[in-house]
Amino acid sequence: MARNSNQHVVPQAGNALDAMKFEVANELGLSNYNQVDKGQLTSRQNGYVGGNITKRLVALGEAALAQQGPGAIGATTNVGLETPQY
């Protein structure tokens, strides 16, 4: 059984991230992604969705940094980054 221990850095963004996930999946031809058991999809299909979401989020972040300038980088220092477990 899959355990999703990922928590949103900004909990209020959860709905927007879900909407983005469904939009990306729909663009990739997975029109009923919100109703499909993700375990029944191939790793490649799920990877395409996640990879495209990541590309969009990076693009949004880059656009925000470009607009706000170098001082905006300091706003991310309070984000709790995970350390690898070896």
Image (spheres, rainbow, N blue to C red):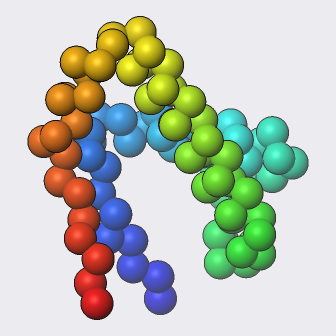
- Residue 31 appearing in the image: no
**Residue in front for this viewpoint, 84 or 5:** 84
Question: Compared to 40, does 23 lie above or below?
Answer: above
Q: Is residue 13 above or below residue 45?
A: above
Task: Give the residue drawn at x 43%, y 37%.
Answer: 15
* Residue 77 vs residue 9, the one in the foreground: 77
Residue at the extreme front: 70
- In x, y percent, where is residue 38? 65, 70
Q: How many marks?
A: 0
Position of 36 with respect to 50 (left or right) is right
Q: Is residue 20 above or below residue 42?
A: above
Q: Quadrant of residue 43?
A: bottom right
- Residue that protrudes farthest toward the left in the picture: 78
Relative to 31, say whether 36 is above or below. Answer: below
Give the quarter of the image for residue 65. Answer: top left
Question: Left or right: 29 with respect to 33?
Answer: right
Residue lying farthest right? 29
Q: Position of residue 85 (x, y in %)?
A: 26, 84
Relative horizontal placement of residue 81, taking residue 35 as reference (left or right): left
| Image-quadrant location for residue 72 | top left
Q: 30 left or right of 67?
A: right
**Which residue is rendered at x = 77% and y = 75% of the image?**
42
Q: Is residue 26 visible?
A: yes
Query: Residue at the spot x=18%, y=29% of the render?
Result: 74
Write the residue at 24% across / 65% down. 82
Residue 10, image x and y in percent? 26, 39
Q: Position of residue 47 (x, y in %)?
A: 68, 64
